[in-house]
Amino acid sequence: MRVLVVGGGGREHALVHSFVESGLGPQVFCAPGNAGIAAEADCVPIGADDVAALLDFAAKERPDLTVVGPEAPLVAGLADLFRERGLRVFGPDADAARIEGSKLFAKEVMGEAGAPTGGYSRHTTLESALAALARHERYPVVIKADGLAAGKGVIIAQDEAEARAAVEDMLVRKTFGEAGNVVLIEEYLTGSEVSLLVLCDGEVAVPLAPAQDYKRIFAGDQGPNTGGMGSYCPVPGFEQKAIDGAMDRVVEPVLAVLRRRGIAYRGVLYAGLIVSADGARVLEFNCRFGDPETQAVLPRLRSDLLELCDAAARGELAGATPAWTPQACVTVVLASAGYPASSHKGDVIEGLDEAAAMDGVTVYHAGTAFAGHVADGGATAGGAAAGSGDRAAGPGGAAAGPGAAGRDIVTAGGRVLAVSALGDGFARARERAYEAVARIRFDGMQYRPDIAARAVRAEAGEISLFPAS
Ligand code: GLY
């Protein structure tokens, strides 16, 4: 079987790593991949957003399955074009990907589905947005650009002045371009967040184990938002009953509304939930696997991920019941100097092999490249590997160390690595993850020291992550 994975981050490395372990014995291509992915797959120097070049590649190579990591190519219609050419894809068509590509569309679908979410108003003019803010009584308030804004289009405004500045930025200064043509002013929801990734085949929806991520850069949830600085799986206190509740009240009704609108959702639906004493409400939907949630979820999966994704793409998920190790998984993201405001490229990474050699540890690469291949102004675009077939024959599987291909591996983006560790319980998984992190070094390396600390305390019964319902 031939599989094409689109993307080049930690999430895609986790997908590739699971796919190469599949009993289906696949040949895996990844576009563009990164220095770690190059140890496991044939990296193809095509950017994840270059839909035309990806289509050309797929038309020539005829992969049996294409799995799309990031949202942008899905929103741009990659899956539609592939399906029109008779290529099997795991990933929603553009009309289904609007669940992430348009925050307003997501709210309208949730409204029709009766899925609980925060209240909101929509605005296309500054006058209307400022009038709504003048009436608004409770702060903070969330200001969202309707469209995709590279993960940056959500502002949590602490007071009216901040909120006014945010809507002016979006509607007048066009900070997020067309993505900010429509602005949502949303209720700020508080509670404990859960990421539920759900495999969907157009009819059947199968949830994976829940995870939690850490969005802020600094310990104690301080500092600016990032793409995600760590995660863990499962989530103590969010057990089968809670998963079933989220499926019944959120995921199934939303998929039913989409079907009524003639939209078959095939791929992964990421439900970002926030759980408070009032129950679970939807914070956001994404049309793709979470990053870094995927890096904490997949190490626990005992079923064949490739078989599951292929079944979803074929519309044959009925009866699938993913099996899980009872072990916990903790994922710590290592970021480069300056992240999230900027990133630092070209810093040599040491200790990858030592970390990856640890029992139960997997080192997923995100913004990495081989020395001398760091793209100017881009994280990994095309720089990870010289081309199709450029597979570094590295020991240790997940992490190709400097000695593996005789080339140094260097930083090439903001989030550089995701270090995942399994353990019997969160305390052991966390200990292992940080032991592995301690073996890795690069200039300016930053990471949060408190990933999964709350899960350890919750598991020990010292705290509860969720209010009693
Ligand atoms: N970890 C958040 C996301 O994938 O959007």
Image: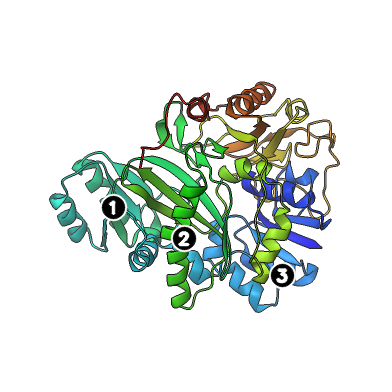
Disc number lying in front (1 or 2): 2
The color scheme shown is rainbow
- The residue wearing badge 2 is 251
Instruction: Name the side, left or right, on which 224 lies relative to 448.
Output: left
**First along the sequence among labels 1 and 3:** 3
Picture disc at residue 56: 3
* Location of residue 1 (image quadrant): bottom right
Residue 149: give x, y in percent of width and height: 44, 54
- The residue wearing badge 1 is 186
Q: Amino acid at mark 3?
A: Asp
Instruction: In this rendered view, identify the residue nearer to me: 247 or 41.
Output: 247
Q: Amino acid at mark 1?
A: Glu
**First along the sequence among labels 2 and 3:** 3
Q: Amino acid at mark 2?
A: Val
Secondary structure beneath label 3: helix
The 10 Å Cα crowd at callout 2, few under 14, some 14 to 19, many 20 or more, is many
**First along the sequence among labels 1 and 2:** 1
Secondary structure beneath label 1: strand
